[in-house]
Image (tube, rainbow, N blue to C red):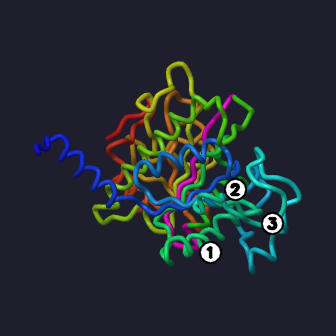
Amino acid sequence: MRISIAAVTGILVQGISLAAGLRILQSNDDGWADFYIRHLNDKLRELHHEVVLVAPPNNQSVPTVFYDDPINGPLQDMVGSRLGPCQHNSCEEGGPMNHNQSRPDLNWVNGHPMHAMQYGIESIVPDLWNGTKPELVINGPNKGNVIWPWLQRIPNAITAAYASAHYGIPAISFAYGSRNGNWSSWNTAKRPRNSRTYVGLVARLLGELQETHEAGKGLLPPDTYLNVNFPPLSATCKEVEDFQWVLAGFAPRGFLDPVPAVEWCGKQTLPSEYKTLHSGCYISIALGNATSMAILADKVAQRNLINRLGSILSCLPAEKRQ
């Protein structure tokens, strides 16, 4: 029997991918049955990551929970049974939590996104992974960009920051701009056009971070989280390859971040997330301090991130890298 070199190479590459997969806890604000979280879940599993999804049963994207409101006590004492079915009729009435009957890795918890994340880390993940904790927490992608000054009021970024600060787990918040006011269900016949692009961009960023992780550097600097915002798609910004990644700061000019930014693109300051998102096909990546949340990580951590992602980072058109 003859085996081609291409076949052997494919087997080896697949073996490397399987060995290199991350343990990821996935959550969101838009609900466990939202199309985007399920699409990303499929993509992560396709890339051989181990993924457990734990999210609210309904859309919880409104600013209803604050950074200092974690669960204090058993979750069952903090949330009651549902009084109606989950979003898109994805679960029946009743109970504080449950999972997909054929897939115990798909879970909903009747609380805020941060509560779902906490319960996932403390109870669900240990049961499914024999006591092993996640290597990464992903929140999103959620509809609606999460930028200054709303960082401490929107669950998306709060969940990511708390996962890093309280549990020491690297965490990333993903949000996308959208001109469509509707949310799509996991089983919709009309798949949102932008989901393929955004999910592809998430996979691209994870691939870059995974390379540094395999080199022994860790996924992110300690006590930090990434706040990543995608702009809406347009006629010229619609494919993964159309977009560029920009290291951004939180506050716009005139509202200086308490922590000086790293020198990058020939400047001592970073463009704000808002400016980045309104400059064309640019994705904003801001490295936040997980404990203080609404301020940037220190310059050492920012330089650390540049060393990890420098191969994909770009400058805005008016800027020039030194």
Which is nearer the N-term, disc 3 or disc 1?
Answer: 3
Q: Which mark is residue 95?
A: 3
Q: Amino acid at mark 1?
A: Ser
Classify residue 175 as left or right of residue 95.
Answer: left
Which is nearer the N-term, disc 1 or disc 2?
Answer: 1
Q: Nearer the viewer, mark 1 or mark 2?
A: 1
Label 3, label 1: how many angstroms apart (C-alpha)? 16 Å
Label count reads 3
Q: Nearer the viewer, mark 3 or mark 1?
A: 3
Which is nearer the N-term, disc 2 or disc 3?
Answer: 3
Identify the residue shown where x is 74% and y is 32%. Answer: 181
Classify residue 83 as left or right of residue 318.
Answer: right
Numbered disc 3: secondary structure: loop
Classify residue 28 as left or right of residue 203.
Answer: right
Q: Amino acid at mark 3?
A: Gly
Numbered disc 1: secondary structure: helix
Closer to us: 49 or 286? 49
For label 1, the residue is 123
From the top left corner, tell me how far across and down residue 201 is, in percent: 47, 40
Q: Spot the residue most to the left.
A: 2
Name the quadrant of the N terminus: top left
Read off the magenta span.
Answer: 164-179
For label 2, the residue is 155
Label 1, label 2: how many angstroms apart (C-alpha)? 21 Å
Identify the residue shown where x is 39% and y is 42%. Answer: 313
What is the crowding at mark 1: few (fewer than 14 residues within 10 Å), some, or many (at least 20)?
few
From the top left corner, tell me how far across and down residue 116 is, in percent: 68, 64
Label 2, label 3: how many angstroms apart (C-alpha)? 23 Å
Q: Amino acid at mark 2?
A: Pro
